[in-house]
């Protein structure tokens, strides 16, 4: 995997990519307070069969920290989504799938109507809600949820956020999560929360339905943020079938960090099934 950068008015977006010589591309979008590195092992497992690209969102990983006096809008759902469509357009992606973890999944479904070559979606630890209030209703009402949007975090708060994302017993995943939280721009946490309260909320399940795209949800019973039982029921009330919801007992909010082998297998199986059905070349 090689590093590359794409220039925008606020600074550079960093992304990791393999070769571009395969028929199908997978674009990975990480969760809030995380980075492209969360998909590192998954990308290694898939890069022989697919072109793989993992993007660092603004204020995350190796991407630029935004000057919020000029470009704060880029730290919002609307900003993230607009950057995603521009990123895909500039790379001229053909026949691609998106794997979105948490907020990465929200970005993907919000941008889907503008991504004409998008062929399917894999949501991991991602809550697609029909209102801002419903989004929070589908999460556990914990103190840690509030920490997500604090500009400044102390060590205990960082540990709490990391533990809600991945199990502390998985030392490598836990340390990576803490590292990513530490290097995330605190202004991004603060400003993103402010924009969540002012920008209109889109009915994401309805957007997904209208897109007609194939999809699966991957959820973990160890997720410290999402109430997976309530969320599963919500999805099924909105027409999602049990076959489209994969729930595993040993993973949490960032599955690719905790079990990359499982995630790579699910992604590969999903894409190959779509090929067999004639959805893509």
Image (tube, rainbow, N blue to C red):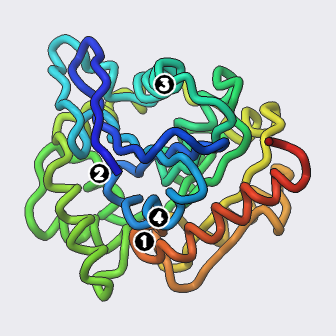
Q: Nearer the viewer, mark 2 or mark 1?
A: 2
At 86% across and 52% down in the image, what residue appears? Answer: 239
At 45% across and 25% down in the image, what residue appears? Answer: 87
CA–CA distance in space, label 3 to label 1: 35 Å
Residue 229 locus on image (x, y percent)? 66, 72
Which residue is tagged 1? 224
Q: Is residue 190 visible?
A: no
Above/below status of 66 relative to 161: above
Around disc 3, counting alpha carbons within 10 Å, would you say few (fewer than 14), some (14 to 19), or many (20 or more)?
few
Which residue is tagged 2? 33
Q: Nearer the viewer, mark 3 or mark 1?
A: 3
Q: Are marks 2 and 1 in contact (CB under 8 Å)?
A: no
Pick the front one: 129 or 258: 258
Which secondary structure, mark 1? Answer: loop
> Which is more N-terminal, label 1 or label 3?
3
Q: Are marks 2 and 3 in contact (CB under 8 Å)?
A: no
Around disc 2, counting alpha carbons within 10 Å, would you say few (fewer than 14), some (14 to 19), or many (20 or more)?
many
CA–CA distance in space, label 1 to label 4: 22 Å
CA–CA distance in space, label 4 to label 3: 21 Å
Which secondary structure, mark 3? Answer: helix
Around disc 1, counting alpha carbons within 10 Å, would you say few (fewer than 14), some (14 to 19), or many (20 or more)?
many
Pick the front one: 46 or 224: 46
> Which is more N-terminal, label 4 or label 1?
4
At 63% across and 36% down in the image, what residue appears? Answer: 109
CA–CA distance in space, label 4 to label 2: 19 Å
Which residue is tagged 4? 42
Pick the front one: 223 or 96: 96
Which residue is tagged 3? 91
Q: Is residue 13 visible?
A: yes
> Which is more N-terminal, label 3 or label 2?
2
Q: Are marks 4 and 2 in contact (CB under 8 Å)?
A: no
> Which is more N-terminal, label 2 or label 4?
2
């Amino acid at each position: 995997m090689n590093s590359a950068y794409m220039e925008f008015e606020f600074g550079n977006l960093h992304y990791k990519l393999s070769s571009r010589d395969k028929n199908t591309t997978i674009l990975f979008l990480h969760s809030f307070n995380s980075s492209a590195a969360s998909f590192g092992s998954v990308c290694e497992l898939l890069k022989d069969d697919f072109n793989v690209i993992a993007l660092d969102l603004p204020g995350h990983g190796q991407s630029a920290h935004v000057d919020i006096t000029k470009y704060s809008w880029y730290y919002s759902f609307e900003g993230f989504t607009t950057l995603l469509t521009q990123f895909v357009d500039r790379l001229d992606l053909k026949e691609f799938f998106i794997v979105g973890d948490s907020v990465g999944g929200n970005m993907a479904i919000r941008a889907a109507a503008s991504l004409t070559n998008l062929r399917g979606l894999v949501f991991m630890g991602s809550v697609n809600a029909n209102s801002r209030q419903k989004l929070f209703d589908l999460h556990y009402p914990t103190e840690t949820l509030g920490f997500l949007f604090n500009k400044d975090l102390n060590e205990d708060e960082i540990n709490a956020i990391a533990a809600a994302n991945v199990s502390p017993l998985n030392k490598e995943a836990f340390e990576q999560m803490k590292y990513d939280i530490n290097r995330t721009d605190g202004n991004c946490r603060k400003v993103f929360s402010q924009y969540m309260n002012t920008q209109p909320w889109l009915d994401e399940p309805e957007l997904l339905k209208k897109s007609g795209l194939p999809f699966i949800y991957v959820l973990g019973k160890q997720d410290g943020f999402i109430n997976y039982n309530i969320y599963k029921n919500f999805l099924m009330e909105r027409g999602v079938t049990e076959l489209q919801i994969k729930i595993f007992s040993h993973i949490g909010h960032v599955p690719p960090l905790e079990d990359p082998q499982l995630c790579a297998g699910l992604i590969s199986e999903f894409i190959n099934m779509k090929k067999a059905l004639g959805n893509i070349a």
